[in-house]
Image (cartoon, grey):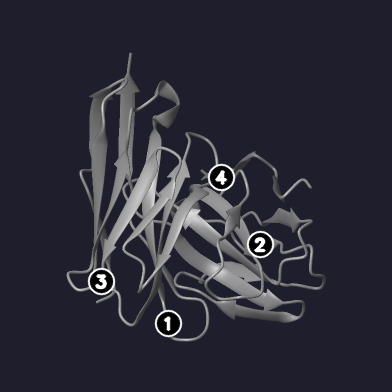
Amino acid sequence: KNQVEQSPQSLIILEGKNCTLQCNYTVSPFSNLRWYKQDTGRGPVSLTIMTFSENTKSNGRYTATLDADTKQSSLHITASQLSDSASYICVVLRNTGGFKTIFGAGTRLFVKA
Amino acid sequence: NAGVTQTPKFQVLKTGQSMTLQCAQDMNHEYMSWYRQDPGMGLRLIHYSVGAGITDQGEVPNGYNVSRSTTEDFPLRLLSAAPSQTSVYFCASSPDRLGDTQYFGPGTRLTVL
């Protein structure tokens, strides 16, 4: 079954600290993996997109990694800020032709002052 | 550019009523899609379109209709609202390549009583 599992479900950290969010997937055939940030009451916004051959992709303080062999990805946030409080969603695109995106349920991150 | 816009932002319906959720984009994107987001679950694809005049079903199409008469607009119609359709609905668009990043609208929060 094509699935995307994210952990933890929620996370609380102090401002200035680093954190890592995990994404495991069983989607096949794999096309690309994306991380989105979703602020409360808003639509998701793209952070990174990685294809099979890419191991790391950065966007400011956000760094995503991909291990296509173990089918795992992580999103590392450096020097967290209050504005990082949001849900982070991992999305995998199936390469079947057509439009087949599989969304994870997200990790809810709370950054406290 | 306004990006992807959705109206209304909030809506309350009674069981059996019908309504149309509006979605428009001004980026000349070919792909448009509708998702629903329920607590604890990933976004699920309802319907999508790969261009004007072309639509197809996603993962959870029952109870919803779509049409795509122009590149800009992609309305979602609820034929006879049910409490199970209480959700947050997101419209998204992307350029004409399958792997491109999706741009999401702000969402419509629908409650069916």
Tell me which corner region of the image, top left, top right, bottom left or bottom right, holds residue B29. bottom right
Which residue position holds label 4?
A: B110
Disc 2 to disc 1, how far (Cα)? 26 Å
User: Which callout, 3 or 1, points at the residue further toward the start of the chain?
Assistant: 3
Q: Which mark is residue A95?
A: 1
Disc 1 to disc 4, how far (Cα)? 32 Å
Q: Determine contact: label 3, label 1, CB under 8 Å.
A: no
Chain under callout 4: B
Tell me which corner region of the image, top left, top right, bottom left or bottom right, holds residue A2. bottom left
Q: Assign a secondary structure to mark 2.
A: strand
Q: Assign a secondary structure to mark 3.
A: loop
Which residue position holds label 3?
A: A68
| Left or right: residue B85 compared with residue A111 | right
* Nearer to us in this view, B58 or B112: B58
x and y, in percent, of residue B36 in the image: 49, 56
User: What amino acid is at disc 2?
Assistant: Leu
Camera-nearest label, 1 or 4: 1
Same chain under badges 4 and 2? The reply is: yes
Same chain under badges 3 and 1? The reply is: yes
Q: Assign a secondary structure to mark 1.
A: loop
Camera-nearest label, 3 or 1: 3
| Left or right: residue A68 compared with residue A44 | left
Q: Assign a secondary structure to mark 4.
A: strand
